[in-house]
Image (cartoon, rainbow, N blue to C red):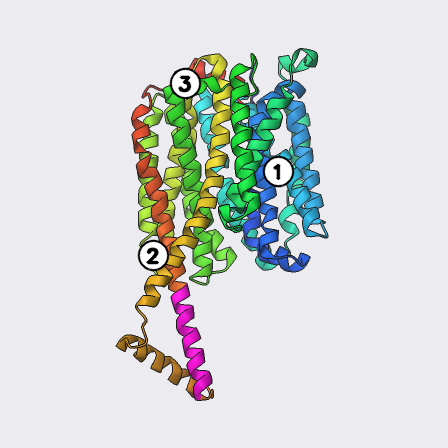
Amino acid sequence: MYPSGIKRAMIVFTTISAAIMELIDTSIVNVALSQISGNLGATIEDTSWVVTAYAIANVIIIPLTGFLQRYFGRKNYYLSSIIIFTVASYMCGNADSLWTLVAWRFIQGIGGGALLSTSQGILFDAFEPKKRAMASGIFGMGIVLGPTIGPTLGGIIVDNYSWPLIFTINIPFGVLAALLTITFIDKKEEELNIDRSAIRIDYIGIAMLVLGVGSLQYVLEKGQSEDWFEDRTICLLSATTIIGLGMFIWRQFIEKVPIINLRVLKNRNLFASNVLTFVCGFGLFGSVFIFPVLVQRIMGYTPTEAGFAIVPGTIVGLFLMPIIGKTLGSGTPPIIYVVIGFTAFIFHGYFSSLATAESSLMWFAFPQLLRGVGTACLMVPLINQAMVGLKPQDYASGIGLTNMLRQLGGAFGIAMMNTFVTQRYAVHRADLITNTAANDPEMMQRLTGATNMFLSKGLNFLDAQQAAFKSIDFSITKQSYLLAYLDSFLLISLFFIITIPFLFMLRTQKVSVEAQAKIAEESH
């Protein structure tokens, strides 16, 4: 018997709001690092651990969600995760030192990591099989809204209030979500009589997963700031990643009841879908990360203005998600939307790369609309496409891998954007300096003009000339970063282009109503 009326509405509200709350916290802190750094007396590099700790906890817990649901029961695990997330949010907002904040952010990430996947399963169970494609569209709205609204909300809070509100704003929503969970979300039949003694816990496999994924996430998050393999810790953790994940993969193939059934990757369709999901995460999180940095650092916009510039793409995504979900349910093959999504992201990167230092936020509206179309056309269809051809007992493993790879793609995208911008900045700066030789007529004319400007402000000749050189150096730096950021948008397009061959590995049939029912039942 499926819920209806107010009960179904409350389940939808609870699961979507919990998922959005978790996803917002993946990006809301980014715009507040300077304020947190100044308030807690730490460097920006150390303060970035506030972001890193949450991301590491998220990526560790997501692949374990299915096992933890089976062991504790889905409702118990979901409610506990909401409570952990809410309490940790309160403690983050009241932290009086950087490392206390980092510790509670890690705990917050442990609670938050469960909300996304578990919310999906609970939402799907509230709909009849024939309506679950629509449920996918509704859930996809949350996936699109969360990462993009984070910088906007963070910018408003930072510009008008204080950084602790970034965390404590979660408290009323967390309390409400917990109360609604207790009231409206029922336990499934198998949750009522869980025989935990019959559930074998692969402690070694879990330890290897935590060690491998945690180390990988650290390397991705901190590699650029620590100069990659010039740093001993990065080298050590890179080796730990290889050993940990290698041993984890080995154990999953020899265990009778693995934590994650990696054998499903033998399915060509699932393998290709997961590669495309990884690229989708790369494109979404990479573009949402790099755009606010570009318009703030180069064009001088405030965090609030930068956040609101992302809104057009978000609105388009929210509008398209239910439509896509409905058409998937009525028979449209997911691959059609995947192709449209790839095309939109490729042109999003291309048009974004055409910006100049004088481009207005309105100029970016069209590229942002393309990002919204691309995200909407990839998120839900890829989840459905991944299940085509899988046996019903393999759906849970397929969904778990898809969710994990989307998050890893996002982490990889942000890390690669950081590294790529730094490298391209150095190249562009060297090229621009080469074109500013002292005997170059244009350079001499510009230097003379700048010197005269500073002389008119009352400086003596030597000070005016030194100020002129600094002014020109600042212009070179700004232009170098601009070109580097524009190159990063082209890199996003390139990633989508080079993975186009995987589109031809996808099967074109839609997921049957019966299969969608089983996906919902097994969904994390």
Question: Mark 2 highlights which residue?
Answer: 355
- Tell me if label 2 and label 3 are in contact, CB under 8 Å: no
Q: Residues within 10 Å of mark 2 (few under 14, many from 20)?
A: some
Question: Mark 1 highlights which residue?
Answer: 109
Q: Main secondary structure of the magenta part?
A: helix
* Mark closer to the chain start, 2 or 1: 1
- Amino acid carrying mark 3 in the image: Lys
Q: Is residue 463 magenta?
A: yes
Which quarter of the rendered picture does the N terminus lie within? Answer: top right
Closest to the camera, between mark 2 and mark 3, is 3
Residue 105: image quadrant is top right
* Mark closer to the chain start, 1 or 3: 1
Would residue 504 be found to the left or right of residue 484 on screen? left
Of residues 399 and 262, the one nearer the viewer is 262
| Looking at the image, residue 231 lies above or below residue 3 | below
Residue at left offset 65%, top offset 25%: 77
Q: Residues within 10 Å of mark 3 (few under 14, many from 20)?
A: few
Q: Secondary structure at mark 2?
A: loop
Q: Position of residue 164 (x, y in %)?
A: 66, 51
Would residue 102 be found to the left or right of residue 302 on screen? right
Q: Position of residue 293 (x, y in %)?
A: 46, 55
| Looking at the image, residue 226 lies above or below residue 324 | below
- Amino acid carrying mark 1 in the image: Gly
Residue 477: mark: none
The segment highlighted magenta reads: 461-477
| Mark 2 to mark 3 CA distance (whole Å) | 43 Å
Question: Mark 3 highlights which residue?
Answer: 266
Q: Residues within 10 Å of mark 1 (few under 14, many from 20)?
A: many
Of residues 334 and 100, the one nearer the viewer is 100
| Mark 1 to mark 3 CA distance (whole Å) | 31 Å
| Mark 2 to mark 1 CA distance (whole Å) | 36 Å
Residue at left offset 59%, top offset 23%: 205
